[in-house]
Image (spheres, helix red, strand yellow):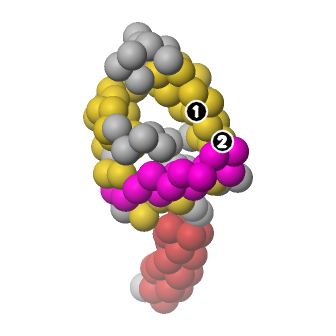
């Protein structure tokens, strides 16, 4: 009887330590990787909080952007360093598709559905 009680006293703390270690590990951000669509829009998000983007407007002209991004729940803030532009948008990932709205420096909103092309 004492041996069984002794085993229970050792198993429970070990289980708690394993649970705490698992919970302490950071979850990877699902944005990491490269996303693109059929209109030649491309976004690449990196683990260090930087991004590169190539956005094509309705007229067919494309612009390149780079800078830093932050994520807070479903709010995505993109601060460009090569142009004076800061975009705050709501984002959503459903399966392998990223939904977001980009507002360029001319205040034109472009709604995008991007597909993950690489990690």
Considering only vertical position in the picture, is 83 above or below 14? Answer: above
Q: Main secondary structure of the magenta part?
A: strand
Looking at the rendered image, the quarter that the C terminus falls into is top right
Q: Secondary structure at mark 1?
A: strand
In this rendering, the count of numbered labels is 2
- Magenta-colored stretch includes residue 22: no
Q: Nearer the viewer, residue 37 or 59?
A: 59
Q: Which residue is mark 1?
A: 53
Left or right relative to 52: residue 98: left
Q: Residues within 10 Å of mark 1 (few under 14, many from 20)?
A: some
Q: Residues within 10 Å of mark 2 (few under 14, many from 20)?
A: some
Residue 107, picture quadrant: top left
Q: Which label belongs to residue 66?
A: 2
Q: Is residue 11 visible?
A: no
Task: Read off the magenta span.
Answer: 74-88
Q: Nearer the viewer, residue 69 or 81?
A: 81
Question: What x and y, as percent, mark residue 75?
Answer: 37, 58
| Residue pictured at 68% horizontal, 51% vertical | 81
Q: Furthest-bottom residue in view?
A: 2
| Residue pictured at 41% horizontal, 23% vertical | 57
Kindly check if marks 2 and 1 are in contact, taking CB atoms under 8 A apart as contact.
yes
Q: Secondary structure at mark 2?
A: strand
Looking at the rendered image, the quarter that the N terminus falls into is bottom left
Q: Nearer the viewer, residue 25 or 55?
A: 55
Q: Nearer the viewer, residue 16 or 60?
A: 60
Considering only vertical position in the picture, is 49 above or below 115? Answer: below
Question: What x and y, as percent, mark residue 80?
Answer: 61, 50
- Magenta-colored stretch includes residue 84: yes
């Amino acid at each position: 009887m004492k041996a069984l009680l002794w085993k229970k006293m050792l198993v429970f703390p070990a289980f708690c330590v394993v649970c705490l270690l698992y919970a302490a590990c950071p979850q990877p951000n699902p944005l990491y990787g490269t996303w693109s669509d059929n209109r030649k829009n491309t976004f690449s998000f990196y683990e260090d909080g930087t991004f590169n983007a190539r956005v094509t407007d309705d007229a067919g002209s494309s612009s390149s952007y780079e800078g830093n991004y932050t994520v807070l729940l479903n709010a995505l803030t993109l601060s460009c360093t090569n142009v004076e532009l800061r975009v705050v948008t709501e984002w959503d990932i459903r399966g392998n598709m990223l939904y977001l709205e980009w507002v360029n420096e001319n205040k034109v909103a472009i709604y995008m559905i991007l597909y993950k092309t690489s990690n």
